[in-house]
Amino acid sequence: MTMTALGEPSVLLKLGEVVLKGRNREIFEMRLRANIKHALKDHRVDIRQRHGVIALFLPAGTEVEEAEAVAARVADVPGIVLVHLAWRVAKDTDAITKAAIELIRDSDEVARKARFAVRSRRRDKRFPLRSNELDRVVGGAINDTYGLPVDLSNPELTVHIEVDKDEAFLFTGGRPGQGGLPVGSSGRALALLSGGIDSPVAAYRMMRRGLRVDFLHFSGIPFTTSESIYKAYALVRNLDKFQGKSRLWVVPFGKAQQSIRNSGQDRLAVIAQRRLMLKTAEEVAHRIHAEALVTGDSLGQVSSQTLANITAQDHAVDLPILRPLIGLDKTEIMAEARRIGTLEISELPDEDCCTLLAPRQAETRAKIEDLKQIEKRLDAEDLAAQLADSIQPYKLDV
């Protein structure tokens, strides 16, 4: 496969629900282009907007491996549905035909005489051939050259041709993107990040809905080691590939937990702790201008996540609490964690702060008035403010 026969490598990005945004579409597309530019800051790329497509032009002479690296990196950017490594050729029927023949020359499908089809699309309607006419010209040449059978209904190999303003693009496959909306198009939220499996997936899901997510981790220090902080850092570093510029703060929560444990309300300790975490997170959210909190709660998964206990936690704060995993079971959450690359990190052993408050029998139907009595004795509002004052920022090395 020679570059002279195929033209220059480029990358085509297909957009999803962004194109349905009507009069606001331009705002979403501007945000997406900015996110792509940040994700590709280490690559020389010219980003050009088309109707429903973003084309990434690479410098002349770029090797295929560099184009593949660009395609792999940008596939992590929410707002993109499909990523195609494409070849850019002159907007000429003969050039397109020769490139299509060369594109598939060394493919396994040609070697085994696979069924094929050609699918053309004209974004530039001035091109002299209609899409079906270009299909027939290029398809006929491929059939004559390789003897592949045509199958328009269920092809094993599809050659895609997209005729654009100044050039044509050819490609045979692609990789799925993240879909959703561009990060930053829906506002900012603060995610409560444990070292477990659920909360990183919850944060990722909210990124896909356009939220820029910052992270708050509660550490059991001084009664636990720093292991959970290392895990939180590693998780945020992994999740940063989806949004960039992620921020992590850590709250030393051990002494506050000790105060809750000494309150004498053993069965309510876990929910009291969760409410204090949310109050602290709300205080931090106000300071960083976040408009919502994000948790990894899944209905009924553990005692603190019964409907009654979730209601009791919602009552602790005024900010909305987003729970994108609320209807998922553990198997579904683990599958998502595996796909986005956080599962292996989450399964590393650590001393989670929640282990400091593990009563033999936890309350599943906490009453808000009982929790308020605990918080009154603790002076929870002032304690949350003090905890927010104690947060420690962790800068990502990315």
Image (cartoon, rainbow, N blue to C red):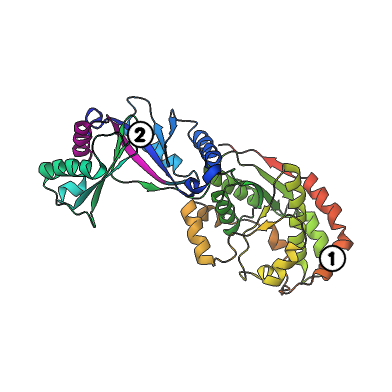
Residue 105 visible in the current orientation: no
Residue 74 visible in the current orientation: yes
Q: Position of residue 37 (x, y in %)?
A: 50, 33
Q: Position of residue 229 (x, y in %)?
A: 65, 48
Q: Which of disc 1 and disc 2 is earlier in sequence?
A: 2
Number of residue marks = 2
Q: Is residue 61 above or below residue 72?
A: above
- 128 vs 199, left or right, is left
Q: Is residue 272 above or below residue 279?
A: below
* Quarter of the C terminus within the rendering: top right
Indicate yes or no whether the magenta region holds residue 1.
no
Which element carries disc 1, helix, strand or loop? helix
Q: Which residues are magenta?
A: 82-103
- Using the rendered view, name the quadrant where residue 298 is placed: bottom right
Name the residue located 84 percent from the left edge and 65 percent from the top edge: 372
- 385 vs 242, left or right, is right
- 27 vs 383, left or right, is left
Q: Verify CB contact (< 8 Å) between mark 2 and mark 1.
A: no
Q: Which residue is mark 1?
A: 372
Counting other residues with Cα less than 10 Å from the Cα at mark 2, is it few (<14), some (14-19), or many (20 or more)?
many
Label at residue 184 = none
Which element carries disc 2, helix, strand or loop? strand
